[in-house]
Image (cartoon, helix red, strand yellow):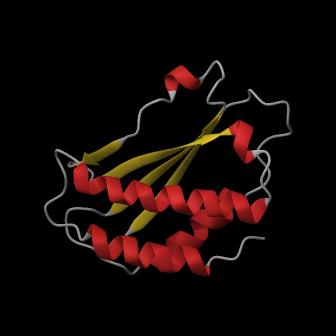
Amino acid sequence: MKIEIKCTITNEFQHDGFTLFDFNHFEEYLTRKFSEKDYGKSVVKYFWGFELYKFNGGFAQFFNDDIESWKFKNKWLVTNSHFDWNEMIKLNRKEVFEAMKVEFLNSVDRIENMARKPKNFDNKTFKKDLEIVLNAYEVK
């Protein structure tokens, strides 16, 4: 199974960018760990959106909804997680990753409550495997 991370980071904060975490390295790590995994025929890719914005800022109105979507035609599961610039900027790399890990795992939990979800996808085993893989990841 493939895992793809889509980062949406607003430029509301006077900062050189969100440099506390290397998303490319993280996505490559997940790709290696999950390339041989199979959780059912209904899903070939888990697409996770990382959305970083000021919860009290001008862009907040565009990011207020959680997304859980199953793209039947492409066999993709799509979820997202929201992160507040005001909080994330206070954290070091390891703390940023811990916050991301919690929200990534929570995004998998939301699959259970989807009205339209894949019939042949073992999201519980996927979540267990994801947790193991995330716990083994070393933040650099």
Residue 56 position, x and y percent, is 64, 24
Q: Nearer the viewer, residue 107 or 48?
A: 107
Left or right position of 56 against 140: left
Question: Residue, x 70% and y 76% (percent of image)?
Answer: 138
Residue 35 visible:
no
Question: Residue, x 73% and y 29% (percent of image)?
Answer: 11
Left or right position of 81 against 98: left
Relative height, residue 98 to residue 70 (above, below): below
- Identify the image quadrant of residue 137: bottom right
Relative height, residue 30 to residue 13 (above, below): below
Q: Nearer the viewer, residue 106 or 80?
A: 106
Relative height, residue 53 to residue 35 (above, below): above
Residue 2 visible:
yes
Which quarter of the rendering shows the N terminus?
A: bottom left
- Identify the image quadrant of residue 122: bottom left
Query: Total label count?
Result: 0
Residue 8 position, x and y percent, is 59, 39
Residue 111 position, x and y percent, is 29, 55
Residue 140 position, x and y percent, is 78, 70
Left or right position of 92 against 22: right
* Residue furthest left in the image: 119
Question: Residue, x 53% and y 54% (percent of image)?
Answer: 5
Left or right position of 129 against 18: left
Question: Residue, x 61% and y 30% (percent of image)?
Answer: 55
